[in-house]
Amino acid sequence: MDVLVTGATGRLGRRLVPHLQDAGHRVRQMSRRGTGPGGVRGDLATGRDLGHALAGAEVVVHAASDPRGNPWEVDVAGTRRLVEAVDRDRLRHLVYVSIVGIDRVPLSYYRAKYAAEQVLLASRLPITLVRITQFHEFADELLETARRGPLLPVPMGWRVQPVDVDDAAAHLAAAAAAEPDGGVVEFGGPEEHSVADLARTWAAVRAPTARVLSTPVPGRLGAALRDGAALPGRGGRGRRTWADYLAGSSSPA
């Protein structure tokens, strides 16, 4: 199939493209600059070149996002622009990469991702919304950032289920080739952890002298994550554990 990947130069997109190519698909990689083999230019924030980038695409894997910038412009308005630009006569499947817990975790970025899902659900396109838990690499980076010398403060009681980014990429490649689900499916890591346990495993590998300090976090965000809002309730599971990831990778810092 002719597959277009938005966000192809991001952490997930870079792992996803080889899985799609290995499955025999023709893959175009959309980014604002459109550089590199298979690169095509398209800008979700402005709509520039989207029609050209999407022309002829049978499958679109929409992995682009802007968590550190303006997700309401890129994730929400950009998804609306994408819906308007797709070739409806050609499109067989649009797979949207979302996050487990976006309907339960009170963060502005999550609210934007949830709004983008609503755009797609209202589009009458053949869609699958794939909500994925946080990647191992992201958790690794957060813990490195949180460490303060000999102390590693972490939220008390928060529950997470991180997943390997390559496991997620393989799952998305398979989902893209399948029939559209028409709604939400979830994908998470193989094991549930408290953030404190996650941090202790991390410290044993990355910072053996650090001491993990669990700190209560009040408010709606803390309550949601203690209640399991970030945990997948159904769907597939990856195979690579957090311990496997730490044993096989160097620090991202």
Image (cartoon, rainbow, N blue to C red):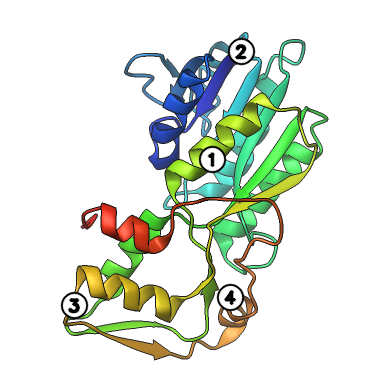
Q: Residue at x 49, y 38 (%)?
A: 169
Q: Secondary structure at mark 3?
A: loop
User: Where 192 falls versus 222 (above or below)?
Assistant: above
Q: Mark 1 — residue?
A: 74
User: Where 149 falls versus 142 (above or below)?
Assistant: below
Q: Residues within 10 Å of mark 3 (few under 14, many from 20)?
A: few
Identify the amino acid type marked 1: Val
Q: Secondary structure at mark 2?
A: loop
Q: What is the C-alpha distance between the residues marked 2 and 4?
A: 39 Å
Towards the viewer: 202 or 132: 202
Identify the amino acid type marked 3: Pro
Q: Position of residue 25 (x, y in %)?
A: 54, 15
Going from the N terminus, do you reach mark 3 or mark 1 first? 1
Quarter of the rendering occupied by the C terminus: bottom left
Q: Mark 3 — residue?
A: 208
Q: Are discs 2 and 4 less than 8 Å apart at CB?
A: no
> Which-is-in-front pick, marks 4 and 3?
3
Identify the amino acid type marked 2: Met
Q: Are discs 3 and 1 less than 8 Å apart at CB?
A: no
> Which-is-in-front pick, marks 1 and 4?
4
Going from the N terminus, do you reach mark 1 or mark 4 first? 1
Q: Secondary structure at mark 1?
A: helix
Q: What is the C-alpha distance between the residues marked 1 and 2?
A: 26 Å
Q: What is the C-alpha distance between the residues marked 4 and 3?
A: 27 Å
Going from the N terminus, do you reach mark 2 or mark 3 first? 2
> Which-is-in-front pick, marks 2 and 3?
3
247 lies left or right of 107: left
